[in-house]
Amino acid sequence: MASMRILDLVYRPVRIYLKEPFVIANENYSYCDVMVIKIKTDGFEGVGEAAPDEVVTGENIKTVFRALGKLKKTLVKSHVDDIGETMYKLGEILPLNRTAKAGVDIALYDAMGKHTGKSVSRLLGGRKLRMETSVTIGITRLEDSVMEAVRYKRDGFKVLKVKVGLDACEDERRLRLIREAVGERIRIIVDANQGYSVKEAISFTKRTRDIGINFVEQPVRADDLKGLKAVRDASDIPIMADESLNSPEDLARIIKIKAADMINIKLMKVGGISAALEMARTAKENGIMVMTGCMDETKVGITAGMHFSTASSGVDLVDLDSYLSHRNEIAVGGVATIKGVNRIYNEPGLGLMLKEGVL
Ligand SMILES: [Mg+2]
């Protein structure tokens, strides 16, 4: 394969509006800003996205913009066909800024796929094209949560992710009402986004044992791994680490003290597909289940998440739904969500195109 030199890196912030304001334990917002990224080579262009969430990685649209400016010089001298090497070099320049690097990594994989005529998933040895996704219910009034749950069930979703963490008693009530409304066959997962104290989290898992909750995501503060472990040890419901896991070092600590049964890997937290593949492999080797999650990503990030998830044998389930709640979209093609199943197609790269005028 001929080497493919990177000629330019271009990027622009785009504001994405949500259909409804979104409330979770530690955030409340009605729009988000993402960075659309394009890598130009002497053959093809690769498209990527960096969707920062300041609460989780400390990055925002401004730090992403500055980081890309710093990475550009090194990138432009690099070649697309050695993504691992290129990402390593970018890591030497900026050890953190994982969301910015994720955007570059995704664009590199898209360009590489187009160059070889293979989908990113195929390129990585993937054989699947579809995976069931969960769909998220934010913290809303009881009756609104129930109505939303029923609507998602009617639309074909089989896994509901219910946000909790502001008020444990109210959370329990919402979960009971949702379970009653959707029946026993719908799976319910719960995400507290660090909202509980260790004591509250333990009592929550005891009180809700009979509701049929598949697992509880990040019940306690991100930096309290010991607390997470205490909850895990006391709970019959499996516990997942999300905000506590941003890097391979975090994963090593979680494995060492057995702080969680499962982890949530997001491309935007870990620095892209290359890093995510490695972490999913390590998790699997250590008996930890993996879910691929997302920030508030458009179709570009979600499609990249699907290519990663279908290619990695370590990924057990996906929670890749953010683009469904957006009013405006930047790309056409890529992932499609039909009756609760995300599907991708065997087209070169990510199989999508930016809409006219986006970048
Ligand atoms: Mg989460």
Image (cartoon, rainbow, N blue to C red):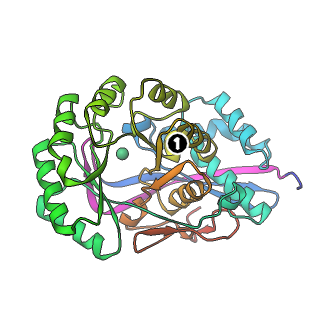
Q: Is residue 24 magenta?
A: yes
Q: Position of residue 176 (x, y in %)?
A: 14, 57
Residue for point 64% across, 52% down: 10
Report whether 288 appears left or right of 1. left
Residue 75 lies in what quarter of the image?
A: top right
User: Mark 1 sits on what residue?
Assistant: 99
In the picture, the quarter occupied by the N terminus is: bottom right
Vertical comparison of 260 with 146: above or below: above
Residue for point 78% across, 51% down: 7
Q: Magenta span: helix, strand or loop, mainly?
A: strand
Residue 25 lies in what quarter of the image?
A: top left
Residue for point 40% across, 38% down: 261
Q: Is residue 338 magenta?
A: no
Report whether 287 appears left or right of 199. right
Q: Who is closer to the viewer here, 249 or 47?
A: 249
Vertical comparison of 321 with 217: above or below: below
What kind of element bears circle 1?
helix
Q: Who is closer to the viewer here, 239 or 136?
A: 239
Residue 164 seen in the figure: yes
Vertical comparison of 201 with 354: above or below: above
Q: What amino acid does circle 1 point to? A: Thr
Question: Which residue is the extreme one toward the right?
Answer: 2
In the picture, the quarter occupied by the C terminus is: bottom right
Q: Who is closer to the viewer here, 229 or 37?
A: 229
Q: Position of residue 126 (x, y in %)?
A: 65, 59
Disc 1 crowd, CA 10 A, few/some/many (<14, 14-19, 20+): many
| Region of the chain picked out in magenta, as a range | 4-28
Q: Who is closer to the viewer here, 340 or 137?
A: 340
